[in-house]
Image (cartoon, rainbow, N blue to C red):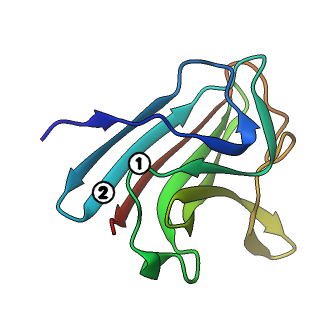
Amino acid sequence: MPWKTWAPTYANLTDASGSVTARYIAAGELIACDYTLPPGSDTVIGTSPTITTPVTANAAHTVVKNAVGQAMFDDVGTETLRGAVRLQSTTTFAPVVFIVSGTHIRESDPSGTVPFTWGNGDAFSFLAVYQGA
């Protein structure tokens, strides 16, 4: 079964790179997604961005905003930070980044300066698996 592309739409994120990779594969109700955004010089990442899903999710997974995948935030040449991607609703993903707060690791919403100040060459990506509606 071949991968299909999807054209995500955004809230609190303006993609000016023109080189997003957004693809998914469906096997019955099982949906697997592969997404990469390499921000360009005109890309704007606001507070708590969301990305539309390629296929509507089963509502049971949005009740506690289940993490459905692993996210990576790549500050080119500096570090790669980990996070998760959650189902914010049946039609939107919400990425979160893991940060240290005291002696605990917690989630934080990404923004233009979290987990770092975004620049050319940096990237955000995630792999997610969830149940379709």
Where in the figure is residue 21, as x and y percent of width and height?
46, 29
* Amino acid beneath label 2: Ile
Give the secondary structure at mark 2. Answer: strand
* Amino acid beneath label 1: Pro
Give the secondary structure at mark 1. Answer: loop
Where in the figure is residue 123, as x and y percent of width and height?
63, 31
Q: Which residue is mark 1?
A: 54
Q: Which residue is mark 2?
A: 31
Q: Is the residue marked by circle 2 packed among few (<14), some (14-19), or many (20+) residues within 10 Å?
A: some
Which numbered disc flags the more N-terminal residue, 1 or 2?
A: 2
Q: Which residue is depicted at the point 61% across and 52% down?
A: 82
Circles 1 and 2 in contact, beta carbons < 8 Å: yes
Give the Cα separation between the discs numbered 1 and 2. 9 Å
Q: Quadrant of residue 4?
A: top left
Q: Spot the residue most to the left.
A: 1
Does 18 sit left or right of 35 as displayed? right
Q: Nearer the viewer, residue 114 or 131?
A: 131
Q: Which residue is depicted at the point 17% across and 36% down?
A: 2
- Does 1 appear above or below 89? above
Does 55 sit left or right of 45 as displayed? left
Residue 119 is at least partly visible in this image: yes
